[in-house]
Image (cartoon, grey):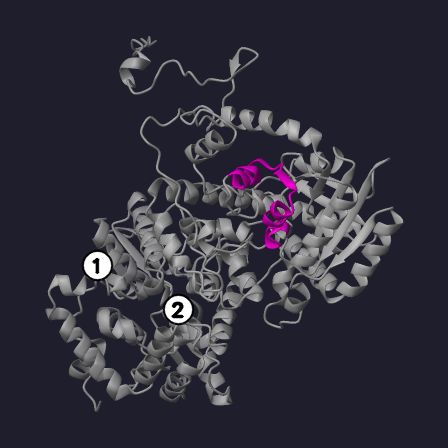
Amino acid sequence: MNTVTKPPRTDERQLHPEHPTEDPHTILHNGRRLDHAEGSSRPLKSRPEPQPRGAKVHGNRPVDQAEAAARFIASPEHEKMHDARLWDLRQKRDREMHAIPEWEDLRSLASAIKEHTLTHLDHYLEQFEASAQANGVHVHWAADAAEHNRTVHGILKDHGARTLIKSKSMLTEECGFRPYMASVGIEVIETDLGERIQELDNEDPSHVVVPAVHKLRTDVAKVFSETIGTDPDNSDVHYLAEAQRTATRPLILAADAGMTGCNFAVAETGTVAVCTNEGNADLSANVPKLHIASIGIEKLIPRLEHLAVFVRLLSRSALGSPLTQYTSHFRGPRKGAEMHIVLVDNGRSQRLAMHQFWTSLKCIRCGACMNTCPVYRRSGGLSYGATYSGPIGLIIDPTYNARKFSALPFSSTLNGSCTNVCPVKINIHEQIYAWRRELVRQHEVPFIKTALMKAAGELLSHPAAYRAAIGAANAVLAHLPRFVIYNGLNAWGKHREVPTPPKQTFHSWYRSNRGGAS
Amino acid sequence: MRIGLFIPCFIDAYAPEVGIATLELLERFGHEVVYPRDQTCCGQPMSNSGYNAESAATEALFARNFSGFDYIVAPSGSCVDHVRTKFDAIEQTPEVLEVRSRTRELVEFLHDIQKVDAFPWATFPHRVSWHSSCQTLRTLRHEKMSELSEPFFSKPLDLLTKVSGIELVESSRPDECCGFGGTFSVFEEFVSAKMGYDKVSDHAHAGAEYIVSADSSCLLHQKSCAQRIGVPVKFIHIAQILNGANS
């Protein structure tokens, strides 16, 4: 029998002198250190990499996504974390998918339910309104962002409300709601942690589900130190989250009104279903005596039984978890409280009439297309300069403003992964392709590109000219010194080597080896 | 069979060895392979950029060059995808539709039409990592897609495992796009290059000596990226391996 002698234990401090043995930022709970992957890490000792900011937006001028993406990539810590974090969500999504044999059937079913609802939207909207009113809810209609903001302001004014707590809502981002509220002197407090970070940093959400995913812990530490007075050098996640909770809870308890978005609005029951992981929709809806829910008209589903299909798909697609921690059903006002619903169009009926693009209204805002998009993961959501980023943004944003977002459909390799992960089967990459044609048709493309493409079309349809051009280009390339090839004007050569042209083309090889008339 | 050999423009100009291997391979199976001399391109560069009208003349030329063959075969997934699933800048006459439906990417042709069961001449004693181009993977459906719940299948790996001595390794993100994307590679060069760097590094981490693909455009882009950041990995088109190249 062999006896195993244990090697003498090496002192941890000898092995890793760079690790401090006592973490001054440890947060203890019942005598034990709170611990998970991020919580257990230590604050960076060196100066943290500054956060790259999003696209430069100048009024109606086309947003240059590529420029902002380049700055994001030039911040390697951010880019690496962002790519890894979102790819991790994609992998978790895959695992959840494999755990459900009927996954593809669920997607087809969800897509069909949305298709049915959107093609009978007038009927279901009226049914929803009637159901909600029967539940004692006040229902308002808003044609656009401005009317939405005015309507909400009107309700708040009627109740003398000065402070509003709200849960995350992409619709309110779309409406420019926070700036509007600031302009009329109402304080808005976001209750979703990520969205609160973005609010305090005066920055838009970069992702529909994880709004601050582009930020490192050190970025959050900086924002909190400047806004709620935390230690700027402490980026421990528990410390930051706890500080935020301590700062925000009193505001939540004292708020005059609460607001939520809506994930699914059930026509038959008038139910507003909101899915969160922090329970913050419940705080927003249940703490104050006034609850306002803003709902995009595409959020409707006919019956409560349909909700089950979407709830099974939503969080699995978004975060790779079987369910969100909370799926809250708000059906009517609490005793002594009021509930208002604002049904918002803001371009949706117009999009419904676009035969190539209307199915984008099926979107349930899960963000799966963003998580899987290799361009999005390396660019950051703010590079799109729009409310909706990533693949779904490329096809939705131009419906709001074809000029401003004219470059976005080109920020894609058309790889098609987005279409495959979409839980409601929107043909996203085909719509990106269709948008390119549409933008060319509307002349919303740079002149130089048009000139280039016209020239390419000419050359490639004239074999003799084409042959001459290939021969000349390769002959020139083979003899150019490196500094001529690798300069600022050659986009290929800035970050890649330029391929060495072979001695002969296939065409000339064929002529010399297989003969025949050319 | 009488086969029209379609050699896309970048293969003609930058990777003639891929065209030669394709021609020789098809001839090994006894086909009459014809290379129409007036061919240029399928129109994809213009159409992919939204300029469909600008690709009409090129598409018309393609249809003229390739009408009347039993099959049109090309060693390029993205070009075949354009011909088969897009290619609508010109009137869809019966002749045009015939050309489109008879166009096959090489792997498809060998796997589905030729149904090859052996490549006795092929030996490739190297560790290779397969790269699916997005069009072969998600439009032409060469392989199972990781995003969908579907059973495993792979036409290219079926073929490659018939080559003696070959050792296949798998990268951690096998169906992530390499970032070429046609004009994307120029208009969005930072992201394109970063995707390429990540892709070749991923293949290299998997232990690949060679990156193998059915798309020369992906290979060209990845090779340029690998050379720039110094990843010591080599590149070869599947046509060359199946035709008996051994390095």
Residue B111 sits in which quadrant?
Answer: bottom left
The structure residue drawn at horizontal position 25% and vertical position 75%, both measured from the top left corner, is B12
The amino acid beneath tag 1 is Glu
Same-chain status of marks 1 and 2: no
**Residue A439 at x, y = what percent?**
49, 73
Residue linked to disc 1: A497
Evaluate whether residue B168 shows in this view: no
Q: Residue at x 33, y 19 (%)?
A: A19
Q: Which mark is residue B78?
A: 2
Q: Which residues are magenta?
A: A172-200
Name the spot of residue A33 as percent of width and height, x first.
50, 16
CB atoms at circles 1 and 2 under 8 Å apart?
Answer: no
In whole angstroms, how far apart are the C-alphas of marks 1 and 2? 22 Å
Quarter of the figure that contains the C terminus of chain B = bottom left
Q: Foreground residue, A209 or A470?
A: A209
Chain that bears disc 2 = B
Please name whichever residue, A147 or B95, is drawn nearer the observer in this view of the structure: A147
Q: Is residue A191 magenta?
A: yes
Q: Position of residue B126 (x, y in %)?
A: 25, 51
Q: For the residues carrying marks 1 and 2, which lies nearer the camera in this image?
A: 1
Q: Chain under label 1?
A: A
Q: Toward which corner of the image does residue A30 lie, by quadrant?
A: top right
The kind of residue tagged 2 is Ser
Q: Residue furthest right?
A: A134
Q: Residue at x 89, y 50 (%)?
A: A134
Instruction: Tell me if A428 is positioned left or right of A258 in this view.
Output: left
- Between A372 and A356, the residue placed more toward the observer is A356
Q: Verify whether residue A51 appears in magenta.
A: no
State left or right for residue A409 relative to residue A489. right
Instruction: Give the structural element (helix, strand or loop) at label 1.
Output: loop
